[in-house]
Image: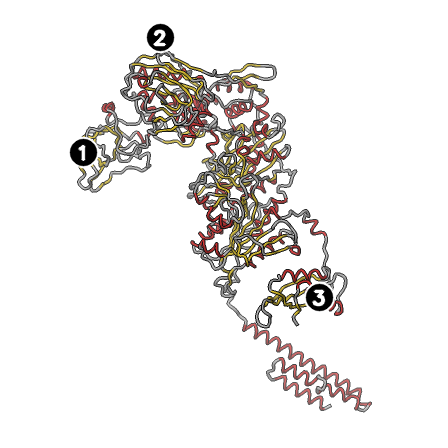
């Protein structure tokens, strides 16, 4: 038995000194390995007299457990100490920059188109499109603007052939024609898209964006038009109250025609949309002219309705305080980054147009 | 159209204020563009006379003038005009006045050491004309009013209206007054029609030639003999000045006055210069004439000209000629009042690029029944001011004016406007606008006034009624929140998805013109047709773009000039393949430059490369719902890509349409353009070539099939010829057993030592997993052998031992 006692004492002594994990593991195998001190004691069991054997075995087991515990405790201790030391060494300067990342952005015109589509979606409009290159017929004649009509002067047109039969559409209104020729009434569509006029200065760009609206049904009157635009303007500018004024105007493809102004005021050199006493023109609209309906084989006795058209770039400028129209198309990295929107900011009905 | 309230009051009796007027003009559709407050400012501008001039002591071109402005002492004014000479009567602006042209306020200032009290003005500075050489020279008639205000005493502001092209009648003050009166703003004063009472014969023969496309249908005229053309009386000058016109001579001023007042253009000829008689006819190609704008015009066939036996006198309804123009010494005049057809006027004016007040009015449509009213009014005024004898009026007419009749059912008003106007009110408005009506069975028959060419059908009547009663009466009907059809169709949803998907990969969305510079376009045109714009705004925007790259590269370069290096931009929009409607494609095009992780303390920097854009393309397509397992990629790309470092992606092997290209931009192009960047890579995704998924998201989600059995990964290294693609190896492995091979990854590509020349080593990790059981060593070994055998057979590769 004294052997065991000696083993234990030696171990206790050794454990007191500073040890690393492999040293402790070595001690462990010295004791419990194949030929370890404790293991060899177990081998001895057979040689011990039967009367002593049981006692020896049970004492041996006790001491074995005891020794194992001592070692395990030590191992845990060392591991803990090692982690502590590791943590101490591993302290870094967390203020160093993160790994580089890049952010993409959505152009304000695209964002505005999505906002507009979302608003009109809620009241049942669907989105239609048309080509950028149009026939002279769809762009003018079908829209009750025959050749030699002075209203054509208001559209400085880019032509693609000498006969002036093909052109870049000067407005989104030809989509009305295409939509009505393609389907049967009722129609309730918006058509956002690129439009072109050969005009270029600080407030005019040779290309800009418009959204067209068209609602034709059996009993659609000017009240519906006013209601629709009133709803749109409030939703778009995210305001509860906004002053709106309908003013008679003239477009060949609508009769009666109106221009719509909204109220604003200037505060610190910036336009504030809402209830100011100044008026700002934002769109043109009217009841679709019976001649236009006849041109697309819709019976103007049975069907009537309204159409409107507005400048998307201008709406974006007003809403987001952008001063220069030309900058929209200049791809200045700084501008795109500043006025662009995160791609995850998708305007939807349920989460609203903006954050 | 410029008007004043004072002039309006010649036709309109009202007690209302100008503020109400401005509102009401807008309410009836005569949009007020600008109101210039003339009275308070302009009263300061005085008629003055230069008494003495001396040379400026310190400046050769300047003079110091003593100016009589009607006060006790003369004013000392420094002036640079060559025509500032002693005795000249001109216009003086005192310190404190605001110069209309420049909007600057005058102060007492030292000019080269000499103090100047105010200034002497040119016509240009007072917005009277474009004339800026020299100061205004007033006629001797002004001698009597030195010190008085040059501009009329009217307190009336200058109101600039934007008249829509359908309303020629409102290009005359009376037409505007009529609209206002109909809307309840005052009462229209009866037009006192004074008629010429004359027995004198009209001795000049006038003839309208009956030709095809004759642009003139009525030509009225009278002769006024023995006139003494003079300066206009003050009231007439004041009137014209008040709307920003410069008085010239009585005869010219009177014709202008009648034009602005009644929208009845007139023309006065010097009758003595007309050879034998007037012939209104179509021009012959090559005929020439000198117009009153001091330009010579060469005419084409078929333009409506007023001629005599010698040749062209003027372009009817557009501009007169110098040969027969009236001057101060003109004795006998022929006064013309005619009707020219709008289309004819417009065609001619467009061809000759001419724009005049008369043309602007005739092309919109003049009242054909105003011929005699205009002649009467002008001739009587001429006689009053210039004396002379008026002849009888002669009217040549080859087509008679037909009065228009429109059927009108009053029920249509409410149907269109959504609100009711009482029958009584309806007829009051129509009467005030000049309509006549007759009751028929179920409708009224309206006679349209001759000055309203815009009114042709029932809806036009509705417009008049709603406009005059006021758009504020239209009630708001709130929209119903109901949707019968989905807002976006599949291709629009795809557009929307790709747009945001690409941005989410670090690209800034740009919008550039649909046109571009043909020089740049040619780099990216490949085999496509060039589409020229006939009338581009500049040579740098002369063609429709065949690819979006040209614009992205131009703007990328501009950003390099701004000092940026590592940029990713993209645009999603049209490219064009032809000049017919519909010959366009929707393309998402991205461009990436420079380096990744430039100057990072933690990441290794590297050039952007073809595998960056490949990732963007493939990831975007996968996110959009396409199966990458089916993608087929080869290296056949258009000539603007680097031939060795670019690829073409099909959604499926054997598909006809290219889904996308990606790669390095051809080094020749970047060099020619002078792109200062380490690397330039790009991609194009062709939206029209992407098959629209028929499966909705809920269909796609329904089947959920995963295996919980153990998976194992096996690595293989193959040696193959360099010209064999990695994709061939992958495809061969995938073909072994689609149910067991769940993932294949290339983790190393090696060429060089230990590998024979013209060969390469590709290391691939294959994940093997069954849906049915845990595979044992035996199963795995079988698959391993099968993979090796298949790859070796299909590609000629050898497994590396």
Picture layout, residue B267 above or below residue A283 = above
Badge 3 local density, few (<14 within 10 Å), some, or many (20+)? Answer: some
Residue pictured at 49% horizontal, 62% vertical: B598
- Looking at the image, residue B799 sits to the left or right of residue B305; the answer is right
- Looking at the image, residue B10 sits to the left or right of residue B700; the answer is left
- First along the sequence among labels 1 and 2: 1
Chain for numbered disc 2: B
Front one among B665 and A112: B665
Chain for numbered disc 1: B
Quarter holding the C terminus of chain B?
Answer: bottom right
Between marks 1 and 2, how big is the CA–CA gap? 55 Å
Disc assigned to residue B247? none
Q: Is residue B772 visible?
A: yes
Between marks 3 and 2, how big is the CA–CA gap? 120 Å
Name the residue carrying label 1: B53
**Rendered image quadrant of residue A74:** bottom right
Front one among A330 and B574: B574
- Residue at the far right in the pictured view: A50
Disc assigned to residue B789? 3
Name the residue carrying label 2: B199
Between marks 3 and 1, how big is the CA–CA gap? 112 Å
Label tally: 3
Nearer the viewer's eye, disc 1 or disc 2? Answer: 2
- Return the x and y of residue B203 as percentages of the image width and height: 35, 12
Q: Is residue A233 visible?
A: no
Query: Regarding mark 3 in the picture, which secondary structure is present there?
Result: helix
**Rendered image quadrant of residue B143:** top left
């Amino acid at each position: 038995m004294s052997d065991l006692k000696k083993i234990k004492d030696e171990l206790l002594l050794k454990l007191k000194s500073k040890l690393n994990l492999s040293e402790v593991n070595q001690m462990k195998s010295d004791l419990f390995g194949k030929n370890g001190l404790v293991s060899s004691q177990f081998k001895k069991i057979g040689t011990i007299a039967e009367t002593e054997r049981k006692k020896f075995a049970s004492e041996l087991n006790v001491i074995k457990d005891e020794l194992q515990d001592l070692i395990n405790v030590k191992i845990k201790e060392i591991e803990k100490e090692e982690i502590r030391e590791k943590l101490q060494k591993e302290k870094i300067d967390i203020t160093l920059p993160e790994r580089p990342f890049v952010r993409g952005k959505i152009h304000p015109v695209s964002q505005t188109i999505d906002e507009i589509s979302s608003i009109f979606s809620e009241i049942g409009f669907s989105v239609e499109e048309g080509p950028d290159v149009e026939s002279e017929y769809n762009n003018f004649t079908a829209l009750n603007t025959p050749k030699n009509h002075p209203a054509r002067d208001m559209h400085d047109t880019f032509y693609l052939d000498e006969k002036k039969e093909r052109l870049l559409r000067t407005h989104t209104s030809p989509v009305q024609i295409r939509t009505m020729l393609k389907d049967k009434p009722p129609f309730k569509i918006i058509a956002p898209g690129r439009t072109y006029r050969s005009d270029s200065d600080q407030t005019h760009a040779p290309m800009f964006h418009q959204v067209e609206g068209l609602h034709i049904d059996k009993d659609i009157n000017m009240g519906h038009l006013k209601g629709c635009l009133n709803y749109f303007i409030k939703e778009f500018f995210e305001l509860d109250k906004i002053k709106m004024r309908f003013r008679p105007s003239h477009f060949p493809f609508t009769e009666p025609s109106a221009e719509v102004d909204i109220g604003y005021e200037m505060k610190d050199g910036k336009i504030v949309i809402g209830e100011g006493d100044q008026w700002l023109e934002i769109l043109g609209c009217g009841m679709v002219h019976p001649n236009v309906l006849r041109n697309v084989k819709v019976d103007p006795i049975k069907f009537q309705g309204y159409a409107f058209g507005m400048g998307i770039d201008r709406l974006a400028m007003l809403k987001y305080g952008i001063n220069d129209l030309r900058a929209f198309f200049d791809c200045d990295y700084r501008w795109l980054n500043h006025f662009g929107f995160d791609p995850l900011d998708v305007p939807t009905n349920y989460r609203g147009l903006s954050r | 159209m410029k008007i004043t309230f004072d002039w309006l009051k010649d036709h309109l009796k009202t007690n209302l204020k100008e503020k109400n007027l401005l509102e009401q003009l807008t309410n009836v559709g005569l949009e007020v563009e600008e109101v210039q407050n003339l009275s308070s400012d302009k009263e300061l501008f005085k008629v003055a006379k230069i008494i003495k001039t001396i040379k400026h002591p310190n400046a050769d071109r300047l003079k110091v003038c003593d100016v009589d402005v009607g006060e006790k002492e003369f004013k000392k004014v420094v002036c640079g005009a060559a025509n500032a000479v002693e005795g000249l009567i001109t216009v003086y602006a005192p310190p404190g006045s605001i110069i209309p042209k420049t909007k600057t306020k005058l102060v007492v200032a030292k000019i080269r050491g000499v103090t100047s009290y105010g200034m002497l003005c040119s016509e240009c500075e007072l917005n009277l004309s474009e004339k800026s050489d020299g100061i205004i020279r007033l006629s001797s008639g002004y001698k009597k009013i030195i010190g008085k205000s040059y501009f009329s005493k009217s307190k009336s502001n200058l109101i600039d209206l934007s008249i829509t092209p359908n309303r020629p009648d409102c290009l005359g003050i009376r037409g505007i007054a009529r609209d206002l009166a109909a809307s309840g703003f005052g009462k229209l004063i009866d037009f006192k029609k004074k008629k010429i009472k004359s027995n004198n014969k009209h001795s000049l023969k006038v003839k309208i030639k009956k030709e095809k496309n004759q642009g003139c249908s009525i030509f009225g005229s009278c002769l006024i003999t023995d006139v003494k053309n003079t300066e206009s009386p003050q009231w007439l000058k004041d009137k014209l000045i008040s709307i920003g016109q410069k008085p010239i001579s009585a005869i010219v001023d009177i014709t202008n006055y009648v034009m602005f007042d009644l929208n009845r253009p007139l023309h006065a000829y010097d009758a003595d210069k007309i050879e034998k008689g007037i012939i209104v006819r179509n021009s012959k190609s090559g005929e020439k004439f000198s117009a009153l704008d001091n330009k010579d015009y060469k005419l084409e066939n078929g333009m409506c000209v007023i001629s005599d036996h010698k040749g062209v006198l003027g372009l009817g309804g557009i501009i007169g000629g110098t040969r027969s123009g009236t001057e101060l010494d003109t004795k006998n005049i022929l006064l013309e009042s005619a009707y020219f057809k709008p289309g004819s006027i417009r065609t001619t004016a467009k061809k000759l690029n001419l724009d005049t007040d008369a043309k602007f009015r005739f092309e919109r449509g003049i009242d054909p029944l105003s011929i005699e009213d205009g002649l009467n009014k002008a001739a009587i005024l001429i006689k009053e001011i210039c004396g002379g004898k008026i002849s009888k009026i002669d009217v040549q007419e080859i087509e008679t004016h037909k009065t228009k009749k429109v059927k009108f059912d009053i029920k249509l008003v409410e149907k269109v406007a959504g609100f009711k106007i009482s029958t009584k009110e309806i007829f009051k408005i129509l009467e005030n606008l000049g309509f006549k009506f007759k009751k028929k069975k179920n409708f009224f028959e309206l006679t349209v006034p001759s000055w309203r060419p815009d009114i042709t059908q029932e809806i036009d009547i509705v417009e008049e009624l709603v406009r005059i009663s006021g758009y504020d009466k239209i009630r708001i009907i709130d929209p119903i929140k109901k949707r019968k059809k989905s807002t976006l169709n599949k291709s629009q949803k795809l557009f929307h998805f790709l747009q945001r998907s690409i941005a989410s990969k670090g690209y800034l969305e740009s919008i550039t013109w649909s046109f571009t510079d043909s020089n740049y376009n040619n780099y990216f045109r490949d085999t496509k047709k060039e589409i020229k714009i006939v009338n581009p705004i500049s040579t740098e925007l002369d063609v429709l773009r065949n690819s979006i790259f040209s614009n992205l590269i131009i703007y990328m370069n501009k950003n390099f000039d701004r000092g940026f290096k590592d940029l990713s931009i993209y645009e999603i929009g049209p490219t064009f393949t032809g000049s017919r409607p519909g010959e366009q494609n929707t393309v998402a095009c991205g461009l990436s430059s420079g380096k990744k992780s430039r100057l990072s303390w933690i990441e290794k920097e590297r050039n952007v490369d073809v595998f960056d854009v490949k990732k963007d393309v493939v990831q975007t397509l996968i996110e959009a719902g396409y199966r990458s397992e089916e993608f087929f990629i080869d290296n056949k790309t258009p000539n603007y890509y680097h031939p060795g470092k670019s690829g073409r992606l099909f959604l499926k092997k054997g598909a006809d349409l290219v889904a996308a290209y990606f790669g390095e931009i051809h080094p020749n192009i970047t060099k020619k353009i002078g792109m200062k960047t380490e690397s330039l890579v790009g991609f194009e995704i062709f939206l029209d070539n992407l098959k629209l998924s028929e499966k909705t998201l809920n269909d796609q989600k329904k089947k959920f099939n995963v295996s919980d059995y153990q998976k194992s990964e096996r690595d293989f290294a193959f040696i193959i010829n360099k010209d064999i693609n990695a994709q061939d190896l992958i495809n061969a492995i995938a073909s072994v057993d689609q149910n067991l091979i769940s993932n294949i990854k290339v983790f190393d590509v090696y060429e060089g030592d230990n590998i024979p020349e013209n060969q390469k080593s590709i290391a691939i990790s294959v994940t093997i997993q069954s849906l049915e059981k845990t595979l044992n060593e035996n199963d795995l070994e079988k698959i391993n052998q099968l993979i090796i055998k298949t790859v070796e057979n299909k590609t000629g590769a050898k497994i590396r031992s």
